[in-house]
Image (cartoon, grey):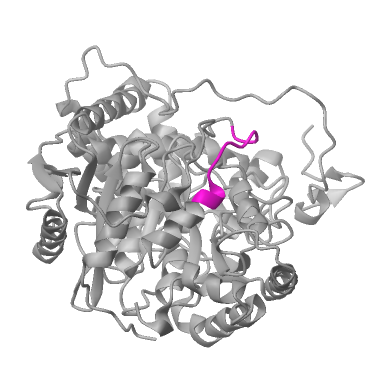
Amino acid sequence: MSKAKLSAIELAKKIHQGETTSVELTQQALDAIAATDDRVNAYISVTAELALDKAAEVDKRIKAGDIRSPLAGIPIGIKDNLCLKGTKTTCASTMLKNFVSPYTATAVQRILDADLIPVGKCNMDEFAMGSSTEHSAFSPTKNPFNYDYVPGGSSGGSAATVAARQVLVSLGSDTGGSIRQPAAYCGVVGLKPTYGRISRYGLVAFASSLDQIGPFSHTVEDSAHLLSLMAGHDPHDSTSLQQAVPQFSDALVDDVRGLKIAVPAELFGESIDPEVLASVKHALDVYVSMGATYEIVSMESFKAALASYYVIAPAEASANLARFDGVRYTHRTSEAESLKEMITRSRSEGFGDEVKRRILIGTFVLSAGYYDAYYGKALKARRVIKNEFDRVFHDYDVILSPTTPTTAFKFGQHSDNPVQMYLNDIATIPANMAGLPALSVPCGVHNGLPIGMQLVGKALDEATLFRMGYAYQQHASIPELEGAL
Amino acid sequence: MSLSEADLEKVASLAHLELDSAHKALYVSQLNSILDQVDTLNALDLTNVSEMTTVVEQDHFQREDSAKKPGDLLLETNAPAWESGGFRVPKIV
């Protein structure tokens, strides 16, 4: 990595050693956003005053020798479905366009306690439902490498701001691939931790049994540090795991000798673009040259993962989004005479088409007479998927595949065909269904657009993913993209 | 199975959504294509497989049941209509 393109951890060292300041870097980030975001649209709101005040505080602490984390002083973008007290959290929806967070999400609070600097709230698909960020009520985010192409989604703004180097790190959320898919499309590192590893308190719920918060960065090293800062039990989230959190930076060793990689045949054939397949094959060759081994394995249940997901996630979403009723903190219609009319009109005006589509599916599969045929069956399929992961992890340390079947697609390419859009998540959804950690790492370029590979690990074994990803970044040679900016 | 426009209207009513006629036709078509995809689940042998609602294997953590004063919840700031310390809504009865 060239000196002009330092990682967040390298830049933080420069702050801590007095070579630069947090205020200077925060101002640079704000200037970069001001100069480029009319084209990228990575942000829904910019928190400049809050950021500069916090950076000045942090600089004082650092000067006094109080360095609260290895990333203290580094600017960070935050997906706009994570609450930050006193700032708007819109979820990219008309429904919440004026909502001011009354409290701060635990993951964000831990980032603030570690003295990172929140510069703004990142664009996304409305309520995190989408794979392109086209479903934002605040206009789509553009892929920084080619503005005709999507950045992926739903955390498209969080991926694009890192890819465009407005900031070096950001936070997103991942329900079916919403961190890993945009990370792959934007050529950055994206991590979905084990379900329960990071508290979901203060994350606006989409599908509660699947949602996880995670970081974007350029390097696996930065990702490991960010997970260490955010992970750990939180009494405000009953699904937050109570297990001890390792120091993930200890896993950053350039040694994969003896590690056994499984490659699912279902994600390594005709369903994947040849250029993507070639890049992932090359990555496997790099691992073999470093002393790891791989085998192709059959994971047939993956064929059912997409179908199962598109029952379970909308079912949970239809229940979670019932709270948006126009009464307490959401958009309210100006024309309604009865309470029922007010609720129905407010929801119909406040939600976009994709959100309505998913609420309708979810309501249908949970409605009387259809539970067994759809929801019950999908929950059983989920068990089959989990069991298949357990079987493969009995013999292998990690599962490697492409993160996405293709590189980024053009705006509007899948707008009329939701099933085609959903197929983008075919490689990422299984890890959500089983609650497993998964990391997307850039592994190639085709026609000026990035390609990502996905590493899925055993539950709570993010360390092996970091070890694999870190070693790959030390040895792989990937063409550097300059981007449209 | 396939979803009819009448089915869609019933589901929309349950979900408190109103749809114009253009959207009804679009959603019937799109939802049916999604349900066709979902029907691939029928290919799985799910005999003796139990439902899995969550991957969390620990007992859900529960906080001590003690009363605490909340901070400022910004109720008035976020309320679409606020009056005399409450949310104003259309007359119910």
Find residue A171 and report its horizontal and vertical position in percent. Answer: 50, 58
Q: Is residue A152 above or below residue A260?
A: below
Q: Please name the residue shown 9% across and 43% down the image.
A: A295
A38 w.r.t. A262: above or below: below
Residue furthest right in the image:
B84
> Horizontally, is A240 left or right of A449 in the view?
right
Height in image: A421 above or below A50?
Answer: above
**In the figure, A143 relative to A470: above or below?**
below
Q: Whole-percent x and y of residue A151?
A: 36, 68
User: Which is the main secondary structure of the residues drawn in magenta?
Assistant: loop
Q: Residue at x 59, y 79 (%)?
A: A25
Q: Residue furthest top?
A: B48
Q: Is A21 positioned to the left or the right of B51 in the image?
A: right
Q: Is residue A395 left or right of residue A460?
A: left
Q: Quadrant of the C terminus of chain A?
A: bottom left
| Extent of the magenta region | A228-237
Q: Quadrant of residue A477?
A: bottom left
Q: Quadrant of the N terminus of chain A?
A: bottom left
Residue A99: say if magenta: no
Q: Residue at x 42, y 66 (%)?
A: A159
B80 or A421, nearer to the observer: A421
Residue B16 seen from this side? no
**Viewer-nearest residue: A244 or A213:** A244
Residue at image position (63%, 49%) is A105
Residue B7 image offset from top left, x and y in percent: 38, 34
Residue B32 lies in what quarter of the image? top left
Residue A221 visible in the displayed image: yes
Q: Is residue A233 magenta?
A: yes
